[in-house]
Amino acid sequence: MALARSLAVAVVGIEGHLVEVEADLARGLPGLTLIGLPDAALHEARDRVRAAVVNSRERWPDHRITVGLFPATLPKSGSGFDLAMAAAILGAAGVVPAAALGSRVLIGELALDGRLRPVRGVLPAVLAAVEAGLANIVVPEPNAGEASLVPGAVVESMPDLASVLGLLRGRPRLGLARFPAALAPARVSEPASVSASAAPPEREPEPIGPDLADVAGQSRGRLAVEVAAAGGHHLFMQGPPGSGKTMLAERLPGLLPPLDTAAALEVTAVHSVAGVLPVGRPLVTRPPFRSPHHSATPAALVGSGSAVIRPGLASQAHHGVLFLDEAPEFGRTSLDVLRQPLESGVIEVARARAATRFPARFLLVLAANPCPCSRARGPRDNTCDCSSTVRRRYLARLSGPLLDRIDIQVALTAPSRAELRADRGLGTSSSVVAERVASARAAMRRRLAGTPWRRNAEVPGPSLRRQWPLRPAATRLADRAFERGLLTARGLDRVLRVAWTVADLKGEDRPGPDEIGLALDLRLPGGSA
C-alpha cells in the first residue's frame, strides 16, 4: 500500500486541533518531503523519525516519501508529530496494518534510538481527541498521568516506537510497555492503559506554602490579604523595606481555596503548554503563584513567540496570584499590558503568523517602596534623602489607569520591636484564615447564584448597584469621597465590592457604614473621606 493515514493533534494556544498525517510512497529518488505548514522543529523530524525507525529494527522504505499534515492551513509546531509520522510511513510501507492507524491518536517525540520522549500540551491534545470521538490515545510514559485526567480517554502509555508498532500489530510488548507505579493498572495481562473515567489515583498533595502566622506586627497587612483572598480583589502594598510586603504576598496563595475540577484542568492545560507542569504532579490543584523579576518584558508577561505563542507569566498565574515586587522598577509597558486582562480575564496575543487567546484571571499583587532610596522607614527612622518630587516621580511609574483597577491599596509601616514582641506566637495561622475565606466565598456563591459571577471582584458596578442596592446612609462616606475627587467612578465601584467582601467575612447580609468605611480605608492609603 502506497498511502496511509495516522492521527495527531496540533495545539494552538491551549486549544487542540485534530490533524491527519498522510504518508505517500512513490517511486523516485529516496527522500522525505514534509508539507502542511511545519515549523523548524517539524522539519528536523525527518532525521529523527528515520533514525528511530532504523534503530527499532524496522526497514526504512527506499522510496520517495511525502508526508502531509492536514488541514494544511493550520500552523503546526513542535516534535509531538514524530510518532504519528513514523506510524504513517510504516503503514504506507505495509509494515503495520493501515486500518489500525485510524482508531488511535498518536502523540510523542522520538529519540534517535526509538524511545518516546514527553511533549508539551498533552492535556489539551487529549481533550481535543476525545471531543472528536477518539478515545484511544498513545502517549509517552512520562505524559500518562497528565493524559489520564481527561474523562473518557483510554490512555495507552508506551516507552518506545517498537512497543507502539507491536500495539498496532495487535501484539503489545508487555515487557516494555511499562506504566508509572502510581498509575499502574490492576491487571498486568492487558496492554498498559488507563481510563480517565476511573477513580483518580492517589497523589501526593501539593504543599500549601508558608504560614501567615509568620508575619508579626502587621495587622493591617494581614487584613488586606484576607479581604483580597476572600473577594478576589487586586492588592497594592506600599511601605519601606521590612514592613512585610513580600511575606504577605507569598502567603496569599495559601489563603485561597483549592481549585475545583474545571479550574484545575484549565490551569493544568496552561502549564502543560508552557512546559512548566511540575514533575510528578500531572494535575495542578492549588492556586499557582508567579513572581517575575522586575526585568521581565511585556512578552514574558502576556506570551511570546511568532509562529508558536506560549502563555506568559500572567496566564500561568490563572486562578492564582501574580506578584510584582518592586513594581515601580518594572517597565511602564510591562505594567500597562496587564490592564486589559485585569478587566477581561483573557489575554489576546496577535503576531504576524498566529493569534491566540489565553485565560488570565489572576489576582494581581503589587508591592512598592515609598521612594527610590528605600530608606524612608517612617517617623522612627527618617533617614531618606529623597525630595517629595523624587518620591512622586518614583511612584508615578505606576500609571493611574493601572492603580484605578486595584481594589485594595494599603500603606504599611515597619513594625517596632515592641510590636514584634507583643505579636510573637499570636498571629492567626493560614489554615484559620483560609476557613474564613472559604465561608465568605460560600456566601458569595449563594448571593451570586444564577449570575455569571462567582466572586465580588467580578461583579460589574452597574449590576452591583442595580441588583444589590445599599441605603444612602450606608454609602455616605464613599459618596463624599467621590464628590471630593478622592475616588473615580471605577474606584467607587471597587469600594462597594470590597465592602461586600468585608460583610461576607463578618457574616453580615449586606454592608453597612462600618463595612463601607473599612473598604474606603483599604482603598485610600493616606487619604481621608
Image (cartoon, rainbow, N blue to C red):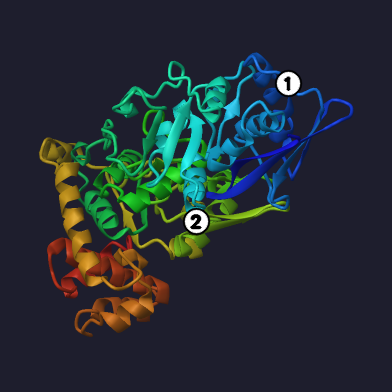
- What is the quadrant of the C terminus in the image? bottom left
- Picture coordinates of residue 249, whole percent (x, y): 33, 44
Marks 2/1: CA distance? 61 Å
The mark closer to the camera, 2 or 1, is 1
Q: Residue at x 32, y 42 (%)?
A: 285
Identify the residue position indicated by label 2 in the image.
Answer: 398
- Picture coordinates of residue 467, whole percent (x, y): 28, 81
User: Who is closer to the viewer here, 310 or 247?
Assistant: 310
Say whether residue 368 is visible.
no
Q: Residue at x 40, y 32 (%)?
A: 193
User: Who is closer to the viewer here, 479 or 342?
Assistant: 342
Q: Residue at x 36, y 33 (%)?
A: 281
Which mark, residue 405?
none
- Picture coordinates of residue 216, whole percent (x, y): 19, 40
Please name the amino acid that badge 2 sits on: Leu
User: Who is closer to the viewer here, 3 or 325?
Assistant: 3
User: Would you place residue 114 above or below residue 358 in this image?
Assistant: above
Identify the residue position indicated by label 1 in the image.
Answer: 60
Q: Earlier in the sequence, mark 2 or mark 1?
A: 1
